[in-house]
């Protein structure tokens, strides 16, 4: 993943606590909270990660572009290249390519956090817009209409919640990915791989519930920024930093309640 890596968690007391919780059969919430505490440097780094902020900026601008009668041209000005009659796959592929081009053209190496954000954003667009489109390979009008639904305060709050749910899960699994398989079989926490899968499914649910903390804030921020002077990259950076702070605290608090 990426070129600027977060690195593995060191053999520290916080990480030892994560390992102990996994081995002792603690809930997904408790493990997530402890992982967040142990990986706090990663979340802190995310607050200043330009790639992560750019993904948020591009998400906001993409839904705003759907308000323009010339959707394709507006997307092109954002660096999102799509066909004359884009379907859902065109939009998501164009979005991902635009993120990578931004890194390449700006000579900014994509960090692991930035790559997590890119993947989370593509998944978010696929799910949110796909559910509101008439078909998976829908016409430009169908995709534009579905995208436009997320250009309101309520719509963007839903989009942001979906994004941060997926980003949080990816962040947690980034750190847990190497540890969980060590607890499968024998006298381990998980009797078999399917038991580990059940745990990661629980972690997904927990990430989605924790991300609710940013939902209302995201809608308010989007509405205010759009009204005042338009959404800028600097505003997206501040918004991202605040959301990561709220998420980190929420994960730790939930983990403490369930620990």
Image (cartoon, rainbow, N blue to C red):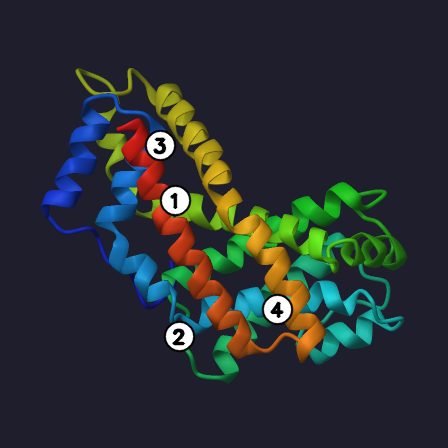
Residue position marked by numbered label 3 in the rendering: 29
Dot 3 or dot 2: first in sequence order is 3
In the image shown, does 247 or 207 lie closer to the viewer? Answer: 247
Mark yes or no: residue 173 visible: no
Q: Distance between the residues labelled 3 and 1?
A: 11 Å
- Which structural element holds mark 4? helix
Quadrant of the rendering where the N terminus is positioned:
bottom left
Depth check, mark 3 against mark 1: the one in front is 1
Q: Position of residue 99 (x, y in %)?
A: 56, 69
Q: How far apart are marks 2 and 4 (CA)?
A: 18 Å
Name the residue at 75% across, 41% down. 131
Residue position marked by numbered label 1 in the rendering: 250
Q: Which quadrant of the figure has residue 235?
A: bottom right
Residue position marked by numbered label 2 in the rendering: 109
Q: Distance between the residues labelled 1 and 4?
A: 26 Å
- Which structural element holds mark 2? loop
Q: Which quadrant of the figure has residue 180?
A: top left
| Residue 50 appears left or right of 215 | left
């Amino acid at each position: 993943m990426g070129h600027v890596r977060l690195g593995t968690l060191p053999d520290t007391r916080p990480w030892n606590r994560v390992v102990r919780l996994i081995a002792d059969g603690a809930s997904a919430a408790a493990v997530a909270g402890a992982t967040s505490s142990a990986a706090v440097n990663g979340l802190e780094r995310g607050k200043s990660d330009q790639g992560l902020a750019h993904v948020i900026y591009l998400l906001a601008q993409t839904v705003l572009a759907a308000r323009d009668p010339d959707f394709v041209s507006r997307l092109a000005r954002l660096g999102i290249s799509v066909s004359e009659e884009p379907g859902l796959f065109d939009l998501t592929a164009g979005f991902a390519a635009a993120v990578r081009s931004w890194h390449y053209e700006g000579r900014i190496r994509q960090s692991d956090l930035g790559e997590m954000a890119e993947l989370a954003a593509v998944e978010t667009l696929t799910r949110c817009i796909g559910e509101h489109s008439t078909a998976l390979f829908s016409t430009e009008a169908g995709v534009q209409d579905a995208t436009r639904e997320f250009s309101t305060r309520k719509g963007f709050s839903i989009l942001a919640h979906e994004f941060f749910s997926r980003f949080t899960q990816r962040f947690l699994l980034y750190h847990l990915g190497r540890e969980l398989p060590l607890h499968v079989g024998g006298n381990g926490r998980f009797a078999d791989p399917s038991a580990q899968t059940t745990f990661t499914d629980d972690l997904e649910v927990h990430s989605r519930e924790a991300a609710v903390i940013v939902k209302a804030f995201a809608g308010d921020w989007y509405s205010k920024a759009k009204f005042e002077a338009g959404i800028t990259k600097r505003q997206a950076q501040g918004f991202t930093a605040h959301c990561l702070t709220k998420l980190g605290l929420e994960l730790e608090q939930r983990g403490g309640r369930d620990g």
